[in-house]
Image (cartoon, rainbow, N blue to C red):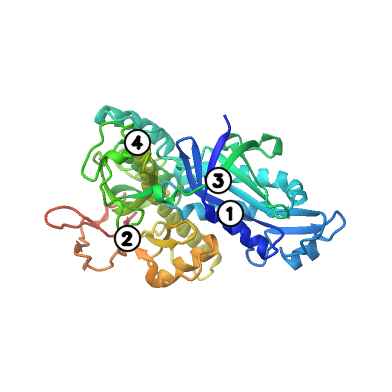
Amino acid sequence: MVKAVQAEESISEYFDGLLKNRVQAEVGLIVGKPSVGSRDLALAVVPTTSQDGEQVLIISQGSAASAAKAKKAGPKVKSNEPAVSIDLESELIAEHALQASRMLPGGLAVLGLYLFAPESGYNSASSQLCSTLAAIAADSSSSSMLSASKEAAAAAAALTAEVSGISAPSAVGSVAGPQELLLLHVDSSSRKFTMRSCQVNSAATAASTLKPTELKFGPSLSSLVCLRCSHSFDFSFPASSSQEQLLQQAVAAESARVTAAVAALDGKVPASSSQPLTELLPASAGSGAADATRVELLCLPHAAAALRSPGAAAGKVGSSSSNVLGSCRLHGTVESLAYVHKRDPVGKALHDLKSDVINSLAARLQLLEDDAAAAADEAKQDAAGAAAHPLLAAGAGKRSRVGLARRVLLPCSSLGLQVCDYLSEADGAEAALEQAQQQLQLTGLQASQVLELEAPAAKKPKIVAGTAMSEVAAGAAGSGGASCSAAVLGAAAAGVVAALAVGMAYVNLGQ
C-alpha cells in the first residue's frame, strides 16, 4: 500500500516564493503530525540555514566547477545553468532536525527533509539525503534520556490495562515520532513535486530503499485541537560524580508512572482506548494553549525506594560507592501539551500527551546533565578551581538548589500552532526568541508573545500566581553517608495541591 501525505497549501506557496526569487537550491525540514489515520500531515517546511558561516548546501556548476567558489557565492545562482551538482553538510542538517524536534510539542514531529533543486542537483545529492535521513532516525531513537524509559514504559502498559481496563499504546516512553521519514524533491525548473519515504528502523544510505509516496494538498490545521495537563513528580537519587545513568533511571521511573496513569479528559474517563476523541471533547476545544482541553493524569504513587547509584549498598545510598557525594531530590510540576486530531481514537491522543510529558521532563534533565558536565570540564581547565556544579560539589553538610529549565510557548505562524523552548533561571524571553529564529526561522516575534506556562523556581518563599511555594529545612548530614534531601516544593489552593512552579532539584551533599 502506497503511503499518503496531506500537505498544507502554505507549503506549495512557500516553494512558489522560492521560484519567484530565483533560488536554485534549498534544503530543510518537513514538520507535521505523523500517523493521522493512514496518512501523515505535513504542516510546514523549515529551511536549514548556514551555521557559523558554514554553508549547509554547496552548488557546483557542472563537474568541473569549484565547490569553494560555489560556497562563497551562496545558494543563489543563475537559473539557466543546464546542470548542477549539490553537496550537503549532512551533520548540520541532522543537528538542525534534532534541535527543531525539541521545540515541537506533543503530537508534532520532524517528518523528513525537502530539497528544492533541479533534477540534476537532486540526483547528485540523493545518497547524502538518504544518509541524513538515517542520521535523523538514529538521533530520534538514541537519546540517552529517552532510551532508558522504553523498557519501563512497556512494562507499565500492561499495568495500565490491569488498572483501568484501557490498553495503552506501546512505547509511550519513547519519542512519539513518525514510523517513516519523508523525502520531498521540488524541481526548481519544472515545479514538479515528488515525495518518497523510508522506514525509520531501516533508514539506509541507498536511494533504492526509498518508496514512492502519494502527495496531496489540502487543509488540516482546523482539525487539530490542543490537549494540556499538569504533571507532578518527586523522586530522589544519589548525587554522584557520574550522573548520566542516574538521570536515565529517573526518566525511566517517571515514564512508568506516566504510562500507567489513568486519564480524565475534561473530567471524563474514557471507556476504552478506541473511543472517538470527539465524544469527550468539550464544545470549546481549540488549538491554542488558552482554549486547550484539560487532561488530568491519575498516576500511581511514587515508589518509596530511591534510585541507587551503581555499586551502592541496598538501603544505604552511597555507603559503599566512593563516587557518591550526597543525595538529590527532583520534584515539582511541569506543564505539557499535545496537538491531536479530532478524529483520533482517545488512546492515541493520550499517547501523544503522555509522550510530551516524558519528553519534556527528559529534555530538562538532559540540560541539567549538560550543565553539570560543562561545569566539570571548566573546573578541570581552570587552574584557580571553578565553582563545582551542585550535582557534583563535594563537602559535608552542604545543601544546594538547582532550578530546572522552565517551558515557554511561542506562536509559529507557518504552523498555525505554538512551539516551545526551555529557559534556565537566568534566561529571559529574548533567549527563546533567538532560539526560535535560529531553529524554526520565526521572525518578527516580540518578548510579550512568549507565553510562560510555568513560574520560575523561587529562591525565597513567595506567592506566584496564587500559589504558595515554600522551602523548609530538615535533616542533617549523616556520618559516613549522604544526608536526606532538605527542601520541599509544594502548593495549596482551596485545599487542592496545584503547584505551578517548574521542578527544582535540591541537593544535600555530605561525606
Using the image, tell me which numbered label, if any, was put on residue 440. none
Say which residue label 3 marks. Answer: 139
- Between disc 1 and disc 3, whose residue precedes? 1
Q: Is disc 1 surrounded by few (<14), some (14 to 19) or many (20+) residues within 10 Å?
A: some
Could you tell me residue 20's position as x and y percent?
66, 64
Mark sitting on residue 453: 2
**Residue in front for this viewpoint, 8 or 433:** 8
As measured in the structure, the alpha-carbon distance from the residue carrying label 1 to the one carrying label 3 is 28 Å
Residue under numbered circle 4: 347
Return the residue at label 1: 12
**What residue type is disc 1 on?**
Ser
Mark 4 falls on what kind of element? helix
Split into 4 quadrants, where in the image is the N terminus? top right
Looking at the image, which residue is at 57% across and 58% down?
13
Q: Residues within 10 Å of mark 3 (few under 14, many from 20)?
A: some
Q: Earlier in the sequence, mark 1 or mark 2?
A: 1
